[in-house]
Image: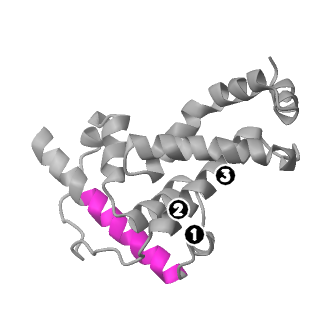
Amino acid sequence: MELDQIINGCLLGDRFCQKALFDRFSGRMFSVCLRYAKTKADAEDLVQDGFVKVFLNLEQYKNDGPFEQWVRRIMINNAIKKYHKKSNQNEYSSSDYLPEEAIEPDVVNKLGEGELLKIIAELPDGFRMVFNLYAIEGYSHKEVSELLHIEESTSRSQLTKARKILQEKLLKFQKSYL
């Protein structure tokens, strides 16, 4: 079934089309949500909540861009709203130095997707949100600050600290690998 047919069926409340839409995009959206969640269960909840929002707001999709990007945006906004509900914005600070050792590219290549997602999931919430939005989704610090209701300087600071933590974790992985 073509995507346009599925969307039209969803707009008419067709459960078969809703399941088809969910089946088509849930795997990719789970990957997106997993980067914003602490656990797989949290990511599953984000996907479920996100699809409820997709179905409730489907009439707002104007076919002015890729549908998957529209769904992805809803998932990200849903994750941000969940973050705001439990956020305290006062993240702990890791050490303020950058490790002097270089990380071997071979070591990074040995990390599986699951291991990398686990390392990202271990970041404090604010650091993880900023890292995902800036480094992975491609938002600017200004956009991140608006989405998370923080100062641009806080976005920059949290990104720097997230990168430091990730680098430290990768160095530990490298030492255990070699």
Left or right for 80, reference 107: right
Q: Are circles 1 and 3 on residues that touch, CB within 8 Å?
A: no
Query: N-terminal of the two: label 3 or label 2?
Result: 3
- Which amino acid type corresponds to the residue marked 1 in the rendered image? Val
What percent of the width, then of the height, locates residue 81? 57, 62
x 21%, y 73%: residue? 95
* Residue under the image location 41 percent in, 41 percent down: 41
Residue sticking out furthest to the top: 1
Badge 3, how many Cα within 10 Å: few under 14, some, many 20+?
A: some
Q: Which mark is residue 134?
A: 2
Task: Say the numbered circle drawn on residue 144.
Answer: 1
CB atoms of marks 3 and 2 within 8 Å = no
> Distance from label 1 to label 3 (Cα)?
13 Å
Q: Is residue 163 visible?
A: yes
Q: Amino acid at mark 2?
A: Tyr
- Whether residues under marks 2 and 1 lie with C-beta atoms below 8 angstroms apart, the answer is yes
Label 3 element class:
helix
Does residue 102 appear in this view? Answer: no
Q: Which corner quadrant holds the C terminus? A: top left
Q: SS for tag 2?
A: helix
Residue 3 at x, y percent in the picture: 80, 27
| Magenta residues, start to end | 152-167
Q: Quadrant of residue 80?
A: bottom right
Q: Nearer the viewer, mark 1 or mark 3?
A: 3
Q: CA distance from mark 2 to mark 1?
A: 7 Å
